[in-house]
Image (tube, rainbow, N blue to C red):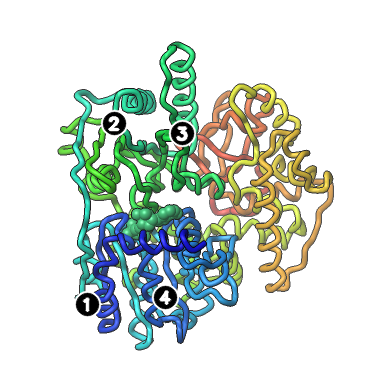
């Protein structure tokens, strides 16, 4: 244990931030708000909290550090608890939605910005914190941007409260000005040169191009790990699969020894134990190839990367006016992101970044920096939250960059449709109850309608199942078998009821893991759903809402689903063709739906969310009766 702690303390002292520890503590002591700018990997996230702790900032409260990403909150808390030689959840803990790994002795708490935002509902001045670090502020996530406005008020109301805002890029001025011109502290950088190689022509299939590039580096390049940036889970899995296939082909086609390649994916839904692997050193000289989303841009620092392969794309949540709602869409990244990605290759020594796009695209087509989330997504949750913080006129809220007025009005309209706001835009009783749940407004509404229509237990299960990634497991090479297993669970009228059916059968089989495996279901996902269910049940208990069951006749459940989703209603237009009831835009059944290709084509259906891939798809649908729509949203439908 001694040698390990020694190396850890040596590692800590080697970080760029260590050389300015005392100056940093001094600026923080002398100012209520400080902006800290430093390269990714300089030690902001893991060290600042510890310096503050060592200096004594936990005497009258605890240290909170916010992260825009769940993975970062978990992974960094893990690392810092190791550095401080305590168990995770003891002195150092983390909290993300539906998961609280903190305890009575926690003094350094990492959390998502969303968690802190929800804490302000119960405690508007954040009494339990002596200091908050808003980390990764350059990401400008929706919740971070709202926190900016709220924390500015806390700073004004509490003299004993301190705020540190950290950012990896050089937009410190903007943050500083927002707080009235507070000091900006720069951590001196220590980075190596990164050579940039562009594609000569725009590339048609960036997954294939990335795989090729990685193989070329692996076979012919000098030692050093590879980091590939892609857009999302499916693409990452496909790339890892292609890479391992290429390696196998290579091994069986040559008599030469082939150097080992350790292929590791990283994305937000990846289980924590697999996430941790990206930080471990590869055994017996193998080269690591990490295949990541933009989570590896600035949120997580991985040492030893000498090669970056940048596809030039990332996924972003954007409000899609055609669909009238948010959708995750693939976009070209900004120049700022491209530079961050390249920088990952120059942390340990001089590196190379392969950009799978042209220099012209970089210079002339990419935006300078990403559009803040608040200016491109649905604000339903934010409006609900600010309304319950008694902010009457949202247009008056102190936003660093205000959202478009249309977007506020549109979100208010949607909340009005759900019955959360009344005709003058104030919270209704229903709206006040909805805020109590850490859920998107439609899901909160679904629960509360379950109370009214007396099928709360059933919708509680559905909401929990919708809060985890798909529980259906579809391993490569066993697609037909797993599809058949999935179909056995299908409830012909509804994907929501299919989820309910899966959960109830799992329950009937004593929540067994082997039963999940036999039926191609993700054990972890189901366990998570059960945990979420019990947490939501706790909230229902505090609201004194009793659990009701409707029993085997699930029509009332469909009616309840209808009431929460009539803003996402679609009607049959042609053979198997659906259009959105509000704006008449086409929306298609997803091939994984229970209704897809079943021959059953109801006149009306509602859907949980829309996704845009090659076309607009409805994700998770339920057939509904037209008179329900008329009953529950009469002003909208002329059916
Ligand atoms: P910053 O927030 O400035 O980007 P961090 O504090 O996240 O920097 O990281 C500083 C250093 O801590 C990294 O360069 C890396 O060496 C180490 N580190 C961070 N997280 C981990 C981890 N999970 N496992 C091992 N080392 C880590
Ligand atoms: Mg960081």
Helix, strand or loop at label 2? It is: loop
The residue carrying pointer 1 sits among few (fewer than 14), some (14 to 19) or many (20 or more) residues within 10 Å by Cα, namely few
Residue wearing tag 3: 263
The residue carrying pointer 2 sits among few (fewer than 14), some (14 to 19) or many (20 or more) residues within 10 Å by Cα, namely few
Q: CA distance from mark 4 to mark 3?
A: 52 Å
The residue carrying pointer 3 sits among few (fewer than 14), some (14 to 19) or many (20 or more) residues within 10 Å by Cα, namely some
Q: Is residue 615 or residue 368 the one in the foreground?
A: 368
Ligand 1 quadrant assignment: bottom left
Q: Quadrant of residue 207?
A: top left
Q: Earlier in the sequence, mark 2 or mark 3?
A: 2
Residue wearing tag 4: 392
Residue 618 x, y percent position in the rendering = 54, 37
Residue wearing tag 1: 180
Q: Earlier in the sequence, mark 4 or mark 3?
A: 3
Q: Which mark is residue 531?
A: none
**Do we see residue 405 in this rendering?**
no
Helix, strand or loop at label 1? It is: loop
Q: Nearer the viewer, mark 4 or mark 1?
A: 1
**Do we see residue 312 in this rendering?**
yes
Given the current orientation, which residue lies at the most extreme front position? 3
Residue 262 x, y percent position in the rendering = 46, 33
Q: Quadrant of the C terminus?
A: top right
Q: Earlier in the sequence, mark 4 or mark 2?
A: 2
Q: Nearer the viewer, mark 4 or mark 3?
A: 3
Q: CA distance from mark 4 to mark 1?
A: 24 Å
Q: Is residue 575 or residue 303 the one in the foreground?
A: 303
Residue wearing tag 2: 222
Helix, strand or loop at label 3? It is: strand
């Amino acid at each position: 244990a001694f040698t390990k702690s020694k190396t850890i303390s040596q590692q800590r002292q080697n970080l760029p931030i260590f050389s300015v520890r005392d100056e940093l503590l001094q600026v923080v002591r002398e100012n209520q708000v400080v902006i800290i700018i430093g390269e990714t990997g300089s030690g902001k996230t893991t060290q600042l909290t510890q310096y503050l702790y060592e200096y004594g900032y936990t005497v009258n409260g605890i240290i909170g550090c916010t992260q825009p990403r769940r993975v970062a909150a978990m992974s960094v808390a893990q690392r810092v608890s190791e550095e401080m030689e305590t168990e995770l959840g003891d002195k150092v803990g983390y909290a993300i939605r539906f998961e609280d790994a903190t305890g009575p002795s926690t003094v350094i708490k990492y959390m998502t910005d969303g968690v802190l935002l929800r804490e302000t509902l119960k405690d508007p001045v954040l009494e339990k914190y002596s200091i908050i670090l808003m980390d990764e502020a350059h990401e400008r996530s929706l919740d971070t941007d709202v926190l900016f406005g709220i924390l500015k008020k806390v700073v004004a109301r509490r003299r004993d409260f301190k705020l540190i805002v950290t950012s990896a890029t050089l937009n410190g001025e903007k943050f500083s000005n927002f707080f009235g011109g507070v000091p900006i502290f720069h951590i001196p950088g220590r980075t190596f040169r990164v050579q940039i190689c562009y594609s000569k022509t725009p590339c048609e299939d960036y997954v294939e191009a990335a795989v090729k590039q990685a193989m070329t580096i692996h076979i012919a390049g000098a030692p050093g790990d590879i980091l590939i940036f892609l857009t999302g889970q499916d693409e990452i899995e496909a790339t890892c699969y292609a890479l391992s296939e290429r390696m196998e082909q290579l091994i069986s086609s040559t008599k030469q020894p082939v150097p080992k390649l350790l292929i590791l994916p990283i994305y937000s839904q990846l289980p924590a134990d697999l996430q941790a692997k990206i930080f471990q050193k590869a055994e017996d000289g193998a080269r690591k190839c990490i295949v990541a989303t933009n989570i590896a841009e600035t949120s997580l620092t991985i040492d030893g990367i000498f090669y970056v392969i940048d596809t030039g794309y990332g996924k972003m949540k954007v409000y899609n006016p055609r669909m009238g709602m948010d959708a995750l869409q693939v976009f070209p990244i900004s120049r700022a992101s491209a530079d961050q990605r390249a920088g990952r290759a120059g942390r340990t020594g001089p590196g190379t970044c392969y950009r799978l796009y042209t220099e012209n695209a970089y210079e002339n087509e990419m935006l300078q920096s990403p559009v803040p989330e608040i200016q491109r997504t649905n604000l339903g949750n934010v409006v609900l939250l600010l309304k319950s913080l008694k902010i009457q006129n949202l247009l008056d809220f102190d936003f660093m960059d205000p959202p478009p007025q249309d977007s506020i009005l549109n979100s208010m309209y949607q909340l009005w449709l759900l019955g959360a706001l009344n005709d003058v835009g104030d919270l209704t009783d229903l709206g006040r109850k909805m805020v109590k749940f850490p859920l998107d407004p439609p899901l909160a509404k679904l629960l509360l309608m379950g109370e009214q229509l007396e099928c709360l237990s059933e919708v509680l299960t559905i909401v929990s199942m919708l809060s985890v990634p798909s529980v259906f497991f579809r391993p490569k090479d066993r697609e037909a078998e797993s599809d058949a297993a999935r179909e056995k669970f299908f409830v012909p009228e509804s994907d929501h009821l299919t989820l309910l059916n899966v959960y109830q059968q799992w329950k009937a089989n004593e929540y067994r893991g082997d039963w999940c495996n036999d039926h191609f279901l993700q054990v972890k996902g189901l366990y998570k759903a059960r945990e979420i269910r019990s947490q939501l049940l706790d909230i229902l208990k505090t609201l004194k809402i009793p659990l009701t069951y409707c029993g085997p006749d699930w029509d009332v459940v469909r009616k309840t689903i209808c009431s929460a989703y009539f803003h996402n209603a679609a009607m049959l237009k042609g053979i198997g063709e659906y259009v959105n009831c509000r704006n008449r835009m086409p929306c298609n059944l997803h091939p994984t739906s229970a209704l897809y290709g079943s021959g059953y084509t109801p006149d009306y259906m509602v859907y949980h969310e829309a996704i845009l891939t090659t076309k607009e798809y409805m994700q998770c649908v339920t057939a509904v009766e037209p008179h329900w729509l008329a009953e529950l949203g009469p002003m909208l439908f002329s059916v």
